[in-house]
């Protein structure tokens, strides 16, 4: 999935939660954690770490609450 599509989806979530003042950051993180697979969360976190160009400020504010994807089990 492209970074532009991830940013657009995250910004749409932020726009929805903007109507609920005071809970936007928590709502954004909860929605993404509950509905996005680990690979999408990882890509979004990488985009935020790279500066978050194109992301709504509320998405960036939600970053500390985003759950990183589980690491793959290491096989011997």
Image (cartoon, rainbow, N blue to C red):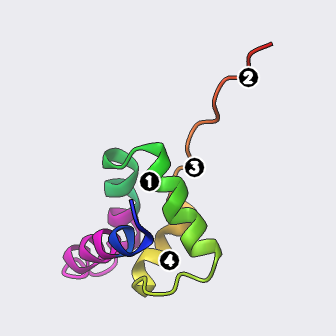
Q: Residue furthest front?
A: 2
Q: Quadrant of the C terminus?
A: top right
How far apart marks 4 and 2 lie (CA) works out to 32 Å
Q: Residue furthest top?
A: 76
In the displayed structure, does residue 2 sit left or right of residue 66? left
Give the quadrant of residue 6: bottom left
- Residue at (39, 85) in percent of width and height: 56
Q: Earlier in the sequence, mark 2 or mark 3?
A: 3
Q: Earlier in the sequence, mark 3 or mark 4?
A: 4
Q: Give the number of the mark in front: 1 or 4.
A: 1
Q: Secondary structure at mark 3?
A: loop
Q: Which residue is mark 2?
A: 74
Q: Residue furthest right?
A: 76
How far apart marks 3 and 4 lie (CA) works out to 15 Å
Q: Give the number of the mark in front: 4 or 2.
A: 2
Q: Position of residue 39 (x, y in %)?
A: 48, 48
Q: Secondary structure at mark 1?
A: helix
Q: Which residue is mark 3?
A: 68
Q: Secondary structure at mark 4?
A: helix
Q: Are marks 3 and 4 in contact (CB under 8 Å)?
A: no
């Amino acid at each position: 999935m492209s970074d532009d599509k991830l940013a657009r989806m995250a910004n749409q979530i932020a726009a929805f939660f903007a109507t609920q003042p005071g809970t936007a950051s928590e709502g954004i993180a909860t929605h993404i954690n509950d509905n996005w697979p680990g690979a999408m969360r990882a890509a979004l976190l990488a985009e935020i770490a790279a500066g978050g160009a194109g992301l709504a400020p509320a998405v960036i504010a939600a970053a500390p609450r985003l759950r990183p994807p589980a690491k793959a089990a290491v096989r011997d």
